Image: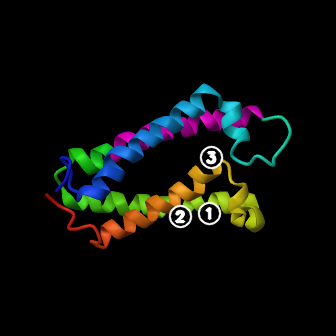
């Protein structure tokens, strides 16, 4: 096993290190400029940003922090392989929900127009899809056995 986790090298790198770092970056983006964070979710949207959206932005930043800690706990701290596997499965389901939420609001045309994605849209859809595929590949043993 790699890097002090239950995971082989590639999934350990992705889920124990890169994903928590990216979540902390998301937290920083949400907290440092919540109006910009909201506006960049869907650049074609115009108009004032409601206070409720700002509250939700701070809340999602808090969820990012929680997910970063949970990811480290379930991939690096625990010695229980089953916990790591269940975490990867549950978060893989969450990836699909995250992608679907973007699709539902963006609509099919904008969702499929990859040439017009900004960094936030790539994060919401592209990174979520990348993580989802890697979670499934890890659970299927593509990178090696999960366990110490």
Q: Is 144 in front, or is 38?
A: 144
Q: Residue under circle 2?
A: 96
Asked whether residue 107 is drawn in magenta, I would say no
Regarding mark 2 in the picture, which secondary structure is present there? helix
The picture places residue 7, in percent across and down from the top left corner, at 23, 57
The picture places residue 21, in percent across and down from the top left corner, at 41, 39
Number of other residues with Cα within 10 Å of mark 1, as a class: few under 14, some 14 to 19, many 20 or more: some
Closer to the eye: label 3 or 2: 3
Cα distance between the residues tagged 2 and 1: 6 Å
Give the numbered dot on residue 21: none
Asked whether residue 63 is drawn in magenta, I would say yes
The picture places residue 86, in percent across and down from the top left corner, at 32, 61
The picture places residue 59, in percent across and down from the top left corner, at 57, 36
- Residue at 70% x, 38% y: name it: 53
Q: Is residue 119 left or right of residue 4?
A: right
Q: Are marks 2 and 1 in contact (CB under 8 Å)?
A: yes
Whether residue 141 is situated above or below residue 43 in the rendered picture? below
Q: Is residue 106 left or right of residue 130?
A: right
Whether residue 18 is situated above or below residue 96 in the rendered picture? above
Number of other residues with Cα within 10 Å of mark 2, as a class: few under 14, some 14 to 19, many 20 or more: some
Q: Quadrant of the C terminus?
A: bottom left
Cα distance between the residues tagged 1 and 3: 18 Å
Q: Which residues are magenta?
A: 50-71
Whether residue 117 is situated above or below residue 32 in the rendered picture? below
| Nearest to N terminus: mark 1 or mark 3 | 1
The secondary structure that most of the magenta stretch takes on is: helix
Q: Is 101 in front, or is 40?
A: 40
Q: Residue under circle 1?
A: 100
Q: Is residue 27 left or right of residue 12?
A: right
Q: Are marks 1 and 3 in contact (CB under 8 Å)?
A: no
Cα distance between the residues tagged 3 and 2: 19 Å
Give the numbered dot on residue 119: 3
């Amino acid at each position: 096993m790699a890097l002090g986790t239950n995971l082989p090298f590639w999934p350990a790198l992705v889920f124990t290190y890169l994903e928590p770092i990216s979540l902390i970056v998301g937290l920083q983006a949400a907290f440092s400029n919540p109006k910009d964070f909201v506006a960049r979710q869907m650049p074609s949207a115009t108009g004032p940003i409601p206070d409720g959206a700002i509250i939700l932005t701070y809340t999602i930043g808090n969820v990012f922090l929680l997910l970063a800690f949970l990811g480290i706990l379930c991939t690096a701290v625990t010695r229980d392989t089953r916990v790591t596997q269940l975490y990867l499965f549950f978060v893989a389901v969450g990836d699909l929900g995250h992608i679907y939420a973007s699709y539902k609001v963006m609509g099919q045309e904008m969702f499929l127009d990859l040439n017009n994605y900004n960094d936030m849209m790539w994060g919401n859809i592209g990174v979520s899809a990348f993580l989802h595929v890697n979670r499934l590949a890890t659970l299927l043993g593509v990178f090696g056995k999960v366990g110490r």
